[in-house]
Image (spheres, grey):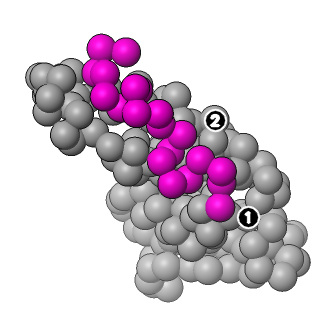
Amino acid sequence: MDTEGTLAPATPAEARAEYGSLVPAAKVAVREAARAMDFDREEYRDRVTGEVIETVRDALFASLLRVHVGTDEEFDEWLDANPGYGSDVAGSENVERVAWHPVPFAGEGGVAVAATFQDEREAALGTLRRRAFGVVYREHVADSDDHDDAGVGDDEVDDPEA
């Protein structure tokens, strides 16, 4: 079994704090992508919205989630060692590998969101991280104070040179 990623919030408050801390990175990523696509100021103002930055922040958060990757036996052993956790598994039962992300505050005693795979590790990790964000985290970060505009002021959206 191996582990990769950095984010493993233990509480909804930690998830909101981590999510909020990604606003600057999301702004920079969007601004640099717009520069690479040669957006002028007018196109930048027209196309780069708080929703665009929020979408990038969602993707950043999901992509940083800590996941464990192992065999289905290792996943079963992990579940046995963590008896309070339920599991939410996507994929086929007829494959040998599983990637999972434990969320201690989801469900009754925690949930391990998981995705099975045979050969396509990176695809499975992407699927798992998107599912974990959509199934668990979105509802907890949606009530963040800055959720509606991703913490983006008009001056920061309107100026691609900022």
Residue tagged by mark 2? 21
Residue found at the very far top of the displayed protein: 161
Please provide the residue range marked out in magenta.
Answer: 143-162
**Which element is circle 1 on?**
strand
- Relative to residue 57, is residue 124 depicted above or below? below
- Image quadrant holding the C terminus, namely top left
- N-term mark: 2 or 1: 2
- In this orientation, does residue 74 appear? no
Asked whether, in this view, residue 148 is left or right of residue 76, the answer is: left
Which corner quadrant of the image does residue 73 belong to? bottom right
Q: Nearer the viewer, residue 109 or 24?
A: 24
Q: Is residue 147 magenta?
A: yes
Residue at 69% from the left image edge and 70% from the top image edge? 112
- Relative to residue 129, is residue 49 depicted above or below? above
The alpha-carbon separation of the residues under discs 2 and 1 comes to 19 Å
Q: Nearer the viewer, residue 103 or 162?
A: 162
Residue found at the very far front of the displayed protein: 154
Which corner quadrant of the image does residue 32 belong to? top left
Q: Is the residue marked by circle 2 packed among few (<14), some (14-19), or many (20+) residues within 10 Å?
A: few
Amino acid tagged 1: Val
Q: Nearer the viewer, residue 98 or 33?
A: 33
Q: Are marks 2 and 1 in contact (CB under 8 Å)?
A: no
Residue at 41% from the left image edge and 67% from the top image edge? 118
Residue tagged by mark 1? 103
Amino acid tagged 2: Ser
Q: Nearer the viewer, mark 2 or mark 1?
A: 2
Question: Where residue 152 is drawn, which disc sits there?
Answer: none
